[in-house]
Image (cartoon, rainbow, N blue to C red):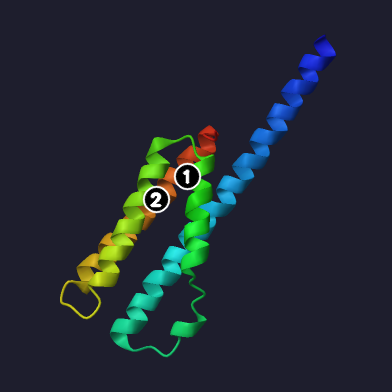
């Protein structure tokens, strides 16, 4: 009986560690993709020729976000992903307007908040 409980505990612990690893991987992907997205927006506004080398993908971004939503048990992290997505949309809408710099700064601030929320969720082990 004790051996069975110990085996169950070890298996649960290993699963939790694997889920935390997945959460870290997908949070890092969101961070990298959002940084690339901001770079693309700056390229569009200021005319850099590097826009194709940024590595941004809407599909990868949606996939990483879906994984975070399914793995995270931390409402602050989930909320920060949603807020970051909206800040990115606002920045994109502002391309070519006087509001671009303000929206780009807001996006950067939301990216920093997301990183903080991700670190806290991972530190506390907040997975499903």
Task: State which tag comes first along the sequence, 1 or 2.
Answer: 1
Residue at the location (48% across, 72% down)? Answer: 56
Residue depicted at 52% across the width and 55% down the height: 64
SS for dot 2? helix
Query: Mark 2 packing: few (<14 Cα in 10 Å), some, or many (20+)?
Result: many
Q: Is residue 18 above or below residue 6?
A: below
State the SS at label 1.
helix
Instruction: Where is residue 124? Give x, y as percent.
Output: 51, 33
Closer to us: mark 1 or mark 2? 1
In percent of the image, x 34 and y 76: which residue is there? 41
According to the image, label 1 marks what residue? 69
Residue 81 is marked as 2
The quarter of the displayed image where residue 105 is located: bottom left
Q: Is residue 41 left or right of residue 94?
A: right
Mark 1 in CB contact with mark 2 (< 8 angstroms): yes
Quarter of the figure that contains the C terminus = top right
């Amino acid at each position: 009986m004790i051996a069975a409980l110990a085996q169950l505990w070890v298996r649960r612990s290993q699963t939790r560690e694997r889920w935390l690893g997945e959460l870290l991987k997908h949070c890092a992907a969101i961070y990298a993709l959002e940084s690339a997205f901001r770079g693309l927006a700056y390229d569009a506004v200021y005319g850099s020729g590097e826009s194709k080398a940024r590595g941004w993908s809407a599909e990868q971004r949606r996939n990483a976000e879906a994984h975070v939503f399914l793995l995270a048990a931390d409402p602050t992290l989930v909320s920060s992903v949603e807020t970051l997505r909206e800040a990115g949309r606002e920045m994109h809408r502002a391309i070519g307007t006087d509001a671009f710099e303000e929206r780009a700064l807001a996006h950067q601030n939301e990216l920093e908040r997301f990183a903080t929320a991700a670190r806290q969720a991972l530190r506390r082990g907040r997975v499903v």
